[in-house]
Amino acid sequence: MTGRATGRIVVVTGGARGIGRAIVDRFAAEGATVVIGDLTDPGELFLQSDVAAGLAVAGHREWVPLDVTDEISILAFSESVAAAHGGVDVLVNNAGIMDTRALADETVAGWDLTMAVNLRGPFLMAKHLVPLMEGRADPAIVNIGSIEGLGANTFHSSYAASKAGVHGLTRALAVELGPAGIRCNAVAPGWIDTELNRGYVDKHPNREQAVADLASLHPVGRIGDPTDVAATVSWLANPDAGFVTGQVVTVDGGRMTRLPIPASLADDA
Ligand code: NDP
């Protein structure tokens, strides 16, 4: 693994924490130069946790401020990356937010913010960074979608719609950019342990039971770790996946694959 991304310039939005952070660390361990586009500077956090984890970082990581809801910010980010590195090999559209509201309580502002981060962000990042990817060796875009682009949880109308949109955008970009040699795929993670969803578990009176119940939904017997997603993103961005484009790869421990069956019949299944 080490060295397989040496010389590659990788941009990861929302790379300061959670899944994005694991993607950043994965590419850095593979030798890439990784530009983290995020609202927050992760600097000190990175140093502290690297020391704690004994992480070997072969590549280089840097932060450039970015708000994916703001086209001016995206343009400034793109100019900064172009000036510092001259191009981009991999764009990972990871930044995302989750809006949990009943339809009756959803607002235009809430709906628009979810769309601005989760769907318009990837569109604008592609629009302004693709010119930096043209002519590079095997450039690739990887969008982080969700199993909620395939199914839906209650009270997630804006989130599920935005992630289904990400999957559609992925296919459209694959078709449009294929002739320019740029591949575009999406990863649809299942339940991954990050701050995005930890609140659901933490507020449960019996946290251990909640974790066990969640794990039992997965044929592999556990919920996901950010590194599970990072490994798939790394593969999709690598020339090993050179004939793979326009795909949505589900990384969910088999949760979407297991057909539901009533508890009363489960022993006979
Ligand atoms: P986190 O909330 O842990 O991290 C999200 C990151 O995105 C943060 O660093 C956040 O910055 C950043 N961010 C938010 N808004 C913006 C913005 N406008 N511009 C730039 N950066 C921004 O989320 P996860 O790591 O869990 O999720 C990452 C992606 O994976 C998301 O797209 C999410 O929808 C998707 N996903 C997650 C799943 C899960 O179970 N965790 C399952 C399926 C999909 P800051 O901290 O400054 O707000």
Image (cartoon, grey):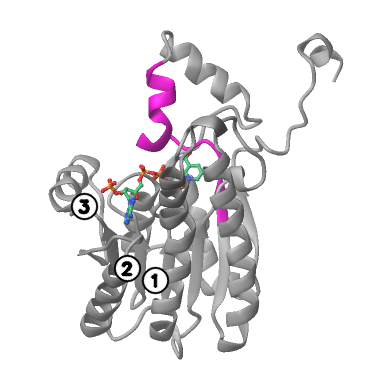
Indicate the position of residue 213 as horizontal and vertical percent values.
Answer: 56, 18
Q: Is mark 1 within 8 Å of ligand 1?
A: no
Relative to 48, residue 6 above or below: below
Is there a contact, CB below 8 Å, between mark 3 and mark 2?
Answer: no
Which type of secondary structure does the marked residue at label 1 adopt? loop
Question: The disc labelled 3 sits on which kind of residue?
Answer: Thr
Residue at coordinates 63% horizontally, 57% vertically from top-left?
248
In front of the other: 250 or 202: 202
Q: In 3D space, how far apart are the residues under numbered discs 3 and 1 (Cα atoms)?
A: 25 Å
Which type of secondary structure does the marked residue at label 2 adopt? loop
Relative to 127, residue 2 above or below: above
Q: In 3D space, how far apart are the residues under numbered discs 3 and 2 (Cα atoms)?
A: 24 Å
Q: Earlier in the sequence, mark 3 or mark 2?
A: 2
Q: How many residues crowd around disc 3 within 10 Å: few (fewer than 14), some, or many (20 or more)? A: some
In front of the other: 98 or 9: 98
Q: Is mark 3 within 8 Å of ligand 1?
A: yes
Residue at coordinates 48% horizontally, 20% vertically from top-left?
211
**Residue picked out by circle 3:** 40
Is there a contact, CB below 8 Å, between mark 2 and mark 1?
Answer: yes
Question: The disc labelled 1 sits on which kind of residue?
Answer: Ala
Which type of secondary structure does the marked residue at label 3 adopt? loop
Residue at coordinates 37% horizontally, 20% vertically from top-left?
202
Which range of residues does the magenta coloring cover?
A: 187-203
Residue at coordinates 22% horizontally, 77% vertically from top-left?
80
Indicate the position of residue 83 as horizontal and vertical percent values.
Answer: 22, 84
Q: Earlier in the sequence, mark 3 or mark 1?
A: 1
**Left or right of residue 128, residue 147 in this image:** right
Q: Which mark is residue 31?
A: 2
**Residue picked out by circle 1:** 5
